[in-house]
Image (tube, rainbow, N blue to C red):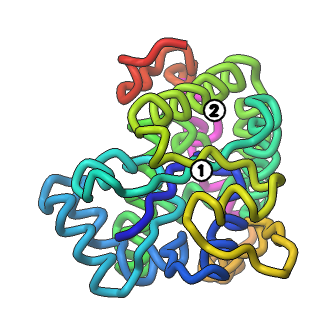
Amino acid sequence: MKLICAGYPKTGSKSCSAALREIGFNVADALETIECLGPTWVEYIEGRAKIEDVISKYEQHNFDTNQDLPGNMLWEELYRALPENTKVILTVRDCDETWFQSWSRFGEQEIERAAIWNIDVQNIIMKLATRGWMGPKMEAWIKIMLFVCDRYWYSSWTKIYRVSTRINEMRSKGNKDFMKQCYRKHNLYVIKSVPKENLLIWNIKNGWEPLCNFLGKPIPNSELEIHPSGKIKKGIRSSMDDFSDGFPDGFQDSFPDEFLTLPSSTNPSRQQNRRFEICST
């Protein structure tokens, strides 16, 4: 691997991938991870493989750059296993408030997209996927998502099945404060850990020049395009959409009450972002 992308979700990762591909890098983004890398990542996070095995899988498929989950969150494991001069890109937004608004809008869009009545079918499908009902690739991807949520954010949302409850929880001040803090801590930790000469802190709106100067590449004549992640992630959702269309009338009524209520453990203030305890704001 030549390059590590350590940017948080919703910081322009899809635009970053498109830009890197245009200047000659072979990026493994979310779709490539699902297709080629998911099972190996799962073996690593479950302790059945080494990070070197993950890197070897990237190289086996001729990927020289990671993007999106889980590599952006496990960037340090990749970084420590690669040569000291490996370069790191940290994509950022203007501020934590701008980032959270993008994060929450995308989250609401995905919740509503997978809803039937007021039931969050996405959560149901995720549980089926972890049991192998949607094939090994989707099973691995969902396991990766759940691992990242549990380790870096909080996993209680996977126990909420009422759409309105999930959206209200996402919009709550407690969740907003918690997620903004997670975003700031992640960025501070990357900045603290990577030597300045090997780190690019890049806001996509600043265009090609910072990226190309950092990587020693000529600046393309074309304008850097912004790629909305929602369009790209339709490929991930297609099998879920097809599956959810098949639920019969009355399906909502078959759920016990505990599936439709907010668990008491969802208070973000009770959750510990274990990875970044050493950082100070």
Residue 66 placement (x, y as % from top left): 46, 66
Residue type, label 1: Phe
Residue type, label 2: Thr
Secondary structure type for disc 1: loop
Q: Quadrant of residue 244?
A: bottom right
Nearer the observer, disc 1 or disc 2?
A: 2
Residue 268 placement (x, y as % from top left): 56, 21
Query: Residue 75: which disc?
Result: none
Residue beneath the point at 47% across and 52% down:
88
Secondary structure type for disc 2: loop
Residue beneath the point at 75% across and 64% down:
208
Count neighbours of disc 2 (C-alpha within 10 A) and say few if under 14, some if 14 to 19, many if 20 or more: some
Q: In this view, does 80 lie to the left or right of 237?
A: left
The magenta-colored residue range is 250-263
Residue 52 placement (x, y as % from top left): 18, 64
Residue beneath the point at 44% across and 59% down:
4
Q: In which quarter of the image is residue 56?
A: bottom left
- Residue that protrudes farthest toward the bottom in the picture: 61
Q: In which quarter of the image is residue 16?
A: bottom right
Depth check: 111 or 46 in front?
Answer: 46
Q: Can residue 247 be seen in this view?
A: no
Query: Residue 255: which disc?
Result: 1
Q: Is residue 261 left or right of residue 102?
A: left
Disc 2 target residue:
261
Q: In which quarter of the image is the C terminus?
A: top right
Instruction: Give the mark nearest the N terminus, 1 or 2.
Output: 1
